[in-house]
Amino acid sequence: MAIVALHSASTGLSAMSTAIDVISNNLANVNTTGFKTLRSNFQDLIYQEKEQPGVENANGDQRPAGLFVGLGTKIANTQASFEQGPTVPTGQDLDLMIQGNGFFQVDILDSQGDVGYTRSGNFFTNRDGEIVLGNSDGPRLEPPITIPEDATTINISADGTVSVLLGGETELTEIGQIQLASFVNPSGLRQIGGNLWVESAASGPPVEGNPGEGSLGTILQNHLEGSNVNPVEELISLIKTQRAFEMNSQTIQAADEVLQVVSNLRR
């Protein structure tokens, strides 16, 4: 009956509406440092099995196919694309980019957990000289590194070694080591805003190490990783999703007209 069509179309409207929300968020973050595009994954819902395939009929033959009527769709999950974003040169000593796999670690100290993970490398120093992430909360880099007051030059090598040139000296002094973390399933990380992810049961525990070790990427100083959002692809997806939304609304109108015809049969 057309009532099933109404239900299926309504699930389509809901799913397409959520997909438009995801695409809108991607486009809104086209200039967000280290942002990773989210993709909506759809799945169909349960089916009404009106006729089973392979059932023997009156002639002793088996039905070659069954009769199934689906009950719509839903968004199963959103999946982040960890494809590397574009390299953006900045010339700032504390702007860092991860070339390859891995996340910077920062101390967030809130209900979400003790450590946050980020691909955004726009760091600077706070009033105590500690290296902090350049978001609205300014969480400290983990393990913590403090830049001396009289440092005139900051050098961060590909393997994460942090060295400074102190006033009156001619050679660099090593003051710390940046460590990265990787996950078996980075798509399982929870996003909490502020360019941060936190560990979840789906992501698995972090594997920590120095840049360049194992599968971890290396550090590129004076550069940032741009957002990997492709505006053209997102706009195409937006148009396709909008058209799908309109088609589902047309299905509701058609089903409503069918039900009106059925209700008029009594007269």
Image (tube, rainbow, N blue to C red):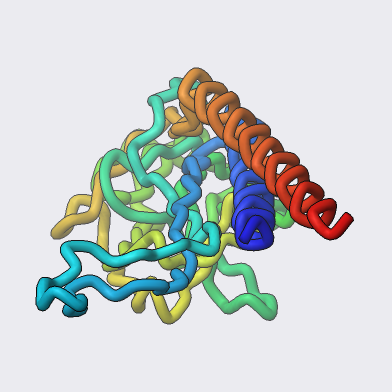
Instruction: Identify the residue at image location x=52%, y=41%.
Output: 35
Residue 3: which quarter of the image?
Answer: bottom right
Where residue 214 sits: x, y (%)? 14, 59
Instruction: Identify the residue at image location x=43%, y=29%.
Output: 223
Residue 50: which quarter of the image?
Answer: bottom left
* 18 vs 115: above or below: above
Residue pushed farthest right?
Answer: 267
Q: Is residue 63 left or right of residue 267?
A: left
Where residue 218 sits: x, y (%)? 26, 44
Residue 266: which quarter of the image?
Answer: bottom right
Q: Is residue 257 left or right of residue 224?
A: right
Residue pushed farthest left?
Answer: 60
Where residue 149 sits: x, y (%)? 61, 47
* 36 vs 10: above or below: above
* 202 vs 261: above or below: below
Whether residue 91 appears in this view of the structure is no
Q: Is residue 261 left or right of residue 81?
A: right
Residue placed most toward the observer, 129 or 203: 203
Where residue 53 sits: x, y (%)? 23, 71
Instruction: Identify the residue at image location x=46%, y=54%.
Output: 42
